[in-house]
Amino acid sequence: MKDFAALFLISLLFNGYSSRPQSPSLQQKNSDWSLKFDDFSAGRISKRRPARPLLVTETDRMFRTTIRQAARKGPNFAGHYSVAYWGRGSGLTSFVVVDVITGHVYDSAPFGFFDVPFRGAYTGRQYEGLVYRPDSRLLVADGCPENGKCGTYYYEWKKNSFTLLRFDPLELSTK
């Protein structure tokens, strides 16, 4: 029984540090980031009943439950979009953006998968993962995309695609 309890605690520790979007209260604490959410206003947040997602691609259909659940909750990004994300094991995350007004699913994430290394890793840095707000077009990806270049990526959602605005590479801790 002790072995089970230990495994359960270890599982909670590792799963708790996956690339989950952060709550608005955590997003406010990142005042040291180069770009600010408030500078990328999305205007009004849609209050309309969310449209059913249009599942066109194989990826959309494979993750249909996750995409539908995210869209059903309403906008969590850029006024009338919902970010739907899923784990790919070992802290890796992928996502799509759903327009909750039209139901269109945008598979144009700037990376195939994103990794948030275990907090307290050899870098001495605590990554935040994917961070966004319902009232902002800014998406901050703080961690390591599949290219292995860890750091903080700033993307603007404009005309239904992401544009890289800035990349702040990882600086190893000297602590």
Image (tube, grey):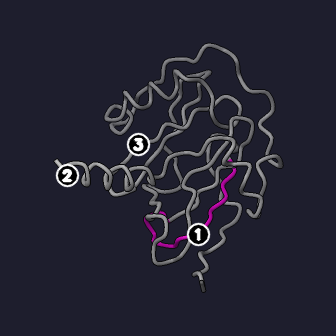
Going from N to C along the chain, the mark reached first, 3 or 2, is 2
Residue hosting label 3: 86
Of the pair 163 and 34, the residue shown nearer to us: 34
Looking at this view, name the residue that lies furthest to the front.
2
Q: Give the crowd class for mark 2: few <14, some 14-19, many >=20 residues within 10 Å.
A: few
Of the pair 79 and 60, the residue shown nearer to us: 79
Give the distance between the C-alpha atoms of the residues marked 2 and 1, in whole angstroms: 38 Å
Residue hosting label 2: 2
Residue hosting label 1: 151
Q: Label 2 sits on what residue type?
A: Lys
Q: Which quadrant holds residue 168?
A: bottom right
Q: Label 3 sits on what residue type?
A: Trp
Foreground disc of the pair 3, 2: 2
Q: Residue at x 81, y 32 (%)?
A: 43
Q: Residue at x 43, y 55 (%)?
A: 112
Label 3 secondary element = strand
